[in-house]
Image (cartoon, rainbow, N blue to C red):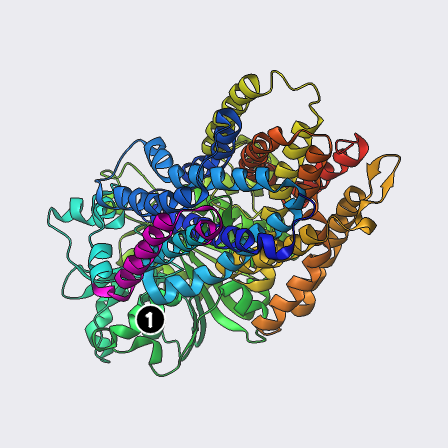
Amino acid sequence: MNSLSHKNILLELLAIFFLSISLFVYEMLITRLFSTILFYHFVFLTISLAVLGLCFGGLIIYKTRKKYSLEKLALTLAFSFFISIIIIYKLPYIKIYLIYSLITSIPFVIGGMILALVFLKYSSISNKLYFADLLGSTLGSVIIIPLMDNLSFMRTLFVIIIFSIFSGVLFSIKFGTKKMKYVLISFLILTSTLLIQKNILLELENNFTSYLTSPITVIEHIRQNSNEEVNIVFSSWDSISRTDVIENNDREKIIITDGGASAPMIRFNGNLDEVSYLKEEINYLPFTIGNNEDTLLIGPGGGKDVLLAILGGSKNIDAVEINSSIVDTVNAYKDFNGDIYNYEGVNLFVEDGRTFIENTNKKYNNIYLSMVMSKAIGYGGLSLTENFLYTKEAFKIYFDHLKDDGYLSFMFHGTFDMVRGINTGIETLLDAGVNQKDILKHFIVINNITNSMMEKHENRINMPIVIFKKKPFTTEEIENIYNAAVKQDRIILNMPGIKNMDLYEDLVLGKWTLEEMYDKLYFNAKPTIDNKPFFYDFKKGVPNILQILIILISIIIVALFRTFTRNIRDLRPLFYFSAIGIGFMLIEISLIQKSILLLGNPIRAFSYTVFSLLLSCGIGSYFSNKKIFKTTIKHRDIVFIFIPILIISLLIILPNSVKLYKDFKEIYKLLILTITLFPLGFFMGMAFPKGILRLKDKEQEEYIPLMLGVNGIMSVMGSVLSLIISMNFGFTITMLFGALMYLSIFIFKLLE
């Protein structure tokens, strides 16, 4: 086997390369698919369980010891991509999420079988195989965005089917029969023809049954409230979101993103008198206090906030919207909305709001964020991402960019995020020198529920407005907003000199400290920070969904270990592959989260970080068999002492990189990130092939599929642990735990 040349294995390497692309992009696709029909935390649960299929694929090979046909498995994989997604796409919504996991896991099982067979057959060149695997994933992390942006969902599915079939063609050249080659080439031509006939696939894409029947979507909510069928007049699906436009009434259309977030788009012909009815809405109250000449809107969505600011007297409006799909939709309906983003005095910026405000020197009379959703599922399903709009650091930046008499205004969803938002503002003001006894003079809270509806809604807080000011509100300002609130019949929850919230009045009176108040509240209301930005995690302790997932995975691990490891005398390989599986995910997910502040966009952060890390890992894998990287100290591989050292170095370098390079162009940020992560990824990439080669050296090749399975399941476990640790202790501690995983290999000689 050692005599294998590059020429002899080139086809296998290329086959693995294209197979890896297809599996990686498939994972992205089902993430986008489930994001439209499930709550974001259930997306994480569903896909994490589905990815376990990779592990089961390896275990099937280990258990059956059969010689499966690689080219037939590749063709089966291609069919499974299509069948899995179409079943979910066309079936009505299913309440049992485990069924979704089982359906979407099938391609992962087949892909895991192929990878296990190839690594088993060519264990002596595992470094090259792993290089091809990681290189495919690297390319997959890059091409998913242009594929989805240019081809939409269903045509992207057919691209990965083509990749899978092509990998089968490559396998068949060396291993297959002539008949099988013709079969694969025929299917390759057929799928390519369907890809070109885009109208057929777009028609299939528009008939998204599970989306239209999901009970958690805005569409279903509107349907129930109106008792009428919802008319979708426009749909698009790109790497950011699925975007739909529905006709609500003559005055507005609603833009819906991923089924769960809505942004109204108001009919406007340039005549402000015709939209003056918007002054009756609670969203208008932040613009009734005083001077609003210079306004910053973060997340203006369909443009309604822009109209509110104009009605409030704003002359210069910076509107910052991260979702380019929404902007494209608003511009497509410019005849309806009066081309609102090109209205006089309006400056549109398509980027992250936090990044924008950090990079501008402007100061504003009013900074307004209206229900900007930050909870989202990260690409890949193995990470939940949060943006950084609601952390203490963000609030400080907002206050720093206010003029002396400026206002920081929010519309929240309900009680939980309102209280956490108020607490964040209070802590930020206290840090800035405001006396705790005067804190009630610095914020106003008004409920969207009116007095006349209070009894019906049982004193519920819904879509409240919270307005902060660096200086105490003046008598004139209080009078202005009080009159506007009374005119709208809104319930005033907190207003200086008029009404105080009991929770914070007790704080001012010294009945408890902030920390004591946080402890007494039944939900997690403590302000978030950049190191723990999970603003929408209101549960104290570990979230239920993560508890369920950790229990399920633990049960699977115990069952698998009892079944497959009874006859293994040396358990060190099991611990070794477990450590690198968990450690890699702890580090990767933390790096993705930390890079969001540098790159300013969760999607770019995922794509660029994964690209940088996997590319360097692949290169490290390729060179892992070189003599220089086999150096040991007392039978301990020195590579595993470099990794913790590099992680600690990164924890120092990354925060400084965010400060130093935040103004750089995106291409330079990608280059900086790639260079910064390269040394760590280079050495981390050596771990897996070193383990495979060690099994071969000990004549334990039969355990290779088992170790692939162990590594796979522990990678999913690592993704869950990364969230649990991050939510409780922060990303820094999570990375240090990852460092400990690799350090344990060195200390306990797990590779000996």
Our reading of the magenta stretch's main secondary structure is helix
Depth check, front residue: 349 or 303: 349
38 displayed left or right of 213:
right
Q: Quadrant of residue 341?
A: bottom left
Quarter that holds the N terminus: top right
Quarter that holds the C terminus: top right
Q: Quadrant of residue 154?
A: bottom left
Q: Give yes or no for residue 186 being in the magenta stretch.
A: yes
Q: Give how far across and how far down residue 569 sits, in percent.
A: 69, 18
Badge 1 marks a residue whose secondary structure is helix
Whether 92 is drawn above or below 548: the answer is below
Residue at image position (60%, 48%) is: 129
Q: Give how far across and how far down residue 470 sits, in percent.
A: 56, 62
Residue at image position (48%, 33%) is: 67
Identity, as a three-letter code, of the amino acid under mark 1: Asp
47 displayed left or right of 748:
left
Depth check, front residue: 151 or 534: 151
Whether 452 is drawn above or below 352: the answer is above
- Residue range (magenta): 170-199
Mark 1, residue position: 328
Whether 344 is drawn above or below 52: the answer is below
Q: Give yes or no for residue 190 being in the magenta stretch.
A: yes
Residue at image position (17%, 66%) is: 251
> Extreme front residue here?
178
Q: Can the viewer see residue 443 in this picture?
A: yes
> Extreme bottom residue here?
344
Depth check, front residue: 656 or 426: 656
